[in-house]
Image: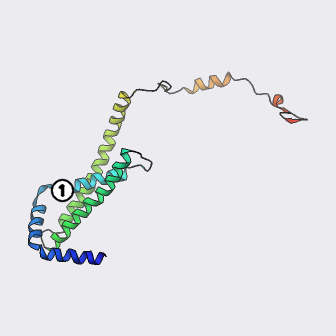
Amino acid sequence: MWILLLVAMGFVLIIFAGDISVFLNTFFAHPFRHVMSVFVGMFAFMVLSAKPNETGLKKLGSKVSFYAFFFFILIFFVLWFPAYFLKKVDSNELWLFLTFSIGCFFIFILFDRFFTPIWEKTEKFFTQKAGTERDKKTDIRAIEKSFKQTKPYDPEFFFHLRNGFWV
């Protein structure tokens, strides 16, 4: 199956070599070709930061990010391989793509580290609290005072030496 697909791609490349060559020249000359690497870095971050127990839209977003990550990598390599063999680009374009992708991945990690506390504070400020939620942490001394108020335990009331437990 894969061999048939490769042969078909080879025939398409031979038949439309002129049009493909013009398209590859245009694509790799355009400065927006690096936007693809930004998307790869962003989707890589979203895939690796996804938690396994997410539900709803977060789970859908992580699945879409997973497929989009591989889609953009596949698109780049589908465009780069013919351009490389037709001598339109050299290996530096591949290194630029990988460098920008990894760089954007780390930039999105930094954005997450910077904006997550701000987002959580904003969410906490605008979210109505439940009536049972405590406003401040419980002091351990208050717990200790409640222990002193408990009644002492008397085992003879529950256990008799002759009869056993509860008899």
Q: Amino acid at mark 1?
A: His
Q: How many marks?
A: 1
Q: Quadrant of the N terminus?
A: bottom left
Residue pictured at 32% horizontal, 48% vertical: 109
Front-most of residues 53 and 135: 53
Label 1 SS = helix
Q: Is residue 10 above or below residue 38?
A: below
Q: Is residue 124 left or right of residue 145?
A: left
Residue pictured at 36% horizontal, 45% vertical: 57
Residue for badge 1: 34
Q: Position of residue 15 (x, y in %)?
A: 12, 76
Quadrant housing residue 124: top left
Residue pictured at 29% horizontal, 48% vertical: 108
Quadrant housing residue 142: top right
Q: Is residue 157 left or right of residue 78?
A: right
Residue pictured at 14% horizontal, 77% vertical: 14
